[in-house]
Image (spheres, rainbow, N blue to C red):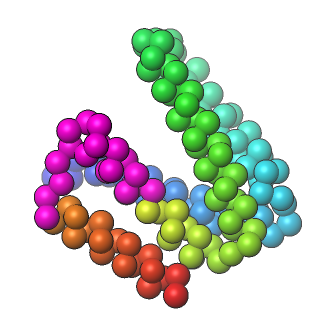
Amino acid sequence: MISLGIVLAFGALVLFGGWAVTAGVATRSLSAVNAVFLSYVASITLVGGYVLWLRRPISGTGTDVGFALLSGAFLAIGSISFYAALERGSVAIVSAIAALYFVIPVIVGVLYFEAELSTANVAGIGLAIVAVVLIAS
């Protein structure tokens, strides 16, 4: 049986793919910053509605709340960069390069959180980079 985590991950894959395509279409006539703003209006409406529906209070340490806010800042600046790249480049190439974002938390995990990489993990990262180079050429 497939775990719920795997099902949700595939859902995220499809939804993030849809996000990249629709963002590319939006930047045909909207500036990057306006397209991001409108997408965030939709996002905060959906997420805010979901949070209200769940009726879960925001609780956690001040440090973790700070990290959540910092992650939002990274997301916002990254989104503006992504949409600006879509204004100037191919959605296939831009989204392929941006999809390598997973390399950053892997490196941080190894350097600061005692994560270990196997030879297969390193080979997988290398193959992902080769795939992006091939897509971009």
Please give the range of residues in magenta.
101-119
Q: Nearer the viewer, residue 53 or 119?
A: 119
Above-or-below relation of 97 to 3: below
Q: Residue at x 50, y 19 (%)?
A: 65
Reply yes or no: does residue 114 show up in magenta.
yes
Judged by its main secondary structure, the magenta piece is helix
Q: Residue at x 25, y 68 (%)?
A: 124
Whether residue 124 sits left or right of residue 48 in the image: it is left
Image quadrant where residue 49 sits: top right
Image quadrant where residue 76 sits: top right
Q: Residue at x 69, y 52 (%)?
A: 80
Above-or-below relation of 76 to 47: below
Image quadrant where residue 100 sits: bottom left
Above-or-below relation of 12 to 136: above
Reply yes or no: does residue 100 show up in magenta.
no
User: Residue 103: percent from the left, percent from the top?
Assistant: 37, 57
Residue 4 visible? The answer is no
Name, please, the residue furthest toward the front.
111
Q: Nearer the viewer, residue 110 or 134?
A: 110
User: Residue 116: percent from the left, percent from the top?
Assistant: 17, 48
User: Residue 96: percent from the left, percent from the top?
Assistant: 50, 70
Q: Residue at x 61, y 36 (%)?
A: 73
Residue 39 visible? The answer is yes
